[in-house]
């Protein structure tokens, strides 16, 4: 597969007022990378199995990261203990 690069040799004429230049520069800037944090509450069983996770909060709800965080905890285990206990865990998704 071959890619062609087209070069624009025509001179650019900048006629925007200074205030509009700043706005135009913002639109040309790359979009910031999206970092998402999801906080879960889960139950650790005395045998060490993690169960019953639910989303307490997420920085960008509705994008599916809450479900992904729950899926990550599905096979999680902790050190066995004398009784069940609840804990919170924040999972950060970074690009």
Image: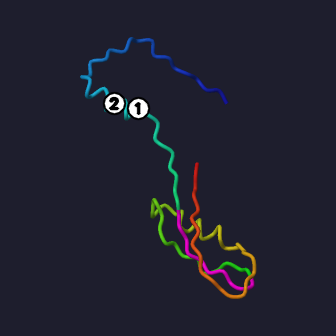
Read off the residue under disc 1.
28
Q: Is residue 92 shown above or below 72?
A: above
Q: Which mark is residue 7?
A: none
Q: Is residue 42 magenta?
A: yes
Disc 2 + disc 1, Cβ < 8 Å? yes
Label 1: few (<14), some or many (≥20) within 10 Å? few
Q: Is residue 79 left or right of residue 57?
A: right
Q: Residue at x 48, y 61 (%)?
A: 63
Label 2: few (<14), some or many (≥20) within 10 Å? few
Q: Residue at x 73, y 80 (%)?
A: 48
Range covered by the magenta-colored residues: 38-47
Q: Is residue 44 magenta?
A: yes
Quadrant of the rendered image containing residue 84: bottom right
Image label count: 2
**Front residue of this view, candidates 8 and 58:** 58
Label 1: element kind: helix
Q: CA distance from mark 2 to mark 1?
A: 6 Å
Q: Where residue 93 sits: x, y (%)?
A: 58, 56
Label 2: element kind: helix
Read off the residue under disc 2.
24
Image quadrant for the N terminus?
A: top right
Q: Is residue 8 shown above or below 45?
A: above
């Amino acid at each position: 597969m071959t890619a062609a690069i087209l070069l624009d040799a025509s001179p650019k004429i900048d006629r925007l007022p200074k205030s509009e230049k700043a706005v135009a520069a913002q639109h040309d800037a790359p979009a910031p990378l999206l970092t998402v944090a999801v906080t879960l509450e889960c139950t650790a069983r005395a045998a060490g199995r993690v169960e019953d996770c639910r989303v307490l909060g997420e920085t960008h709800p509705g994008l599916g990261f809450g479900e992904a965080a729950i899926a990550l905890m599905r096979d999680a285990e902790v050190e066995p203990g004398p009784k069940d206990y609840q804990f919170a865990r924040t999972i950060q998704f970074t690009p």
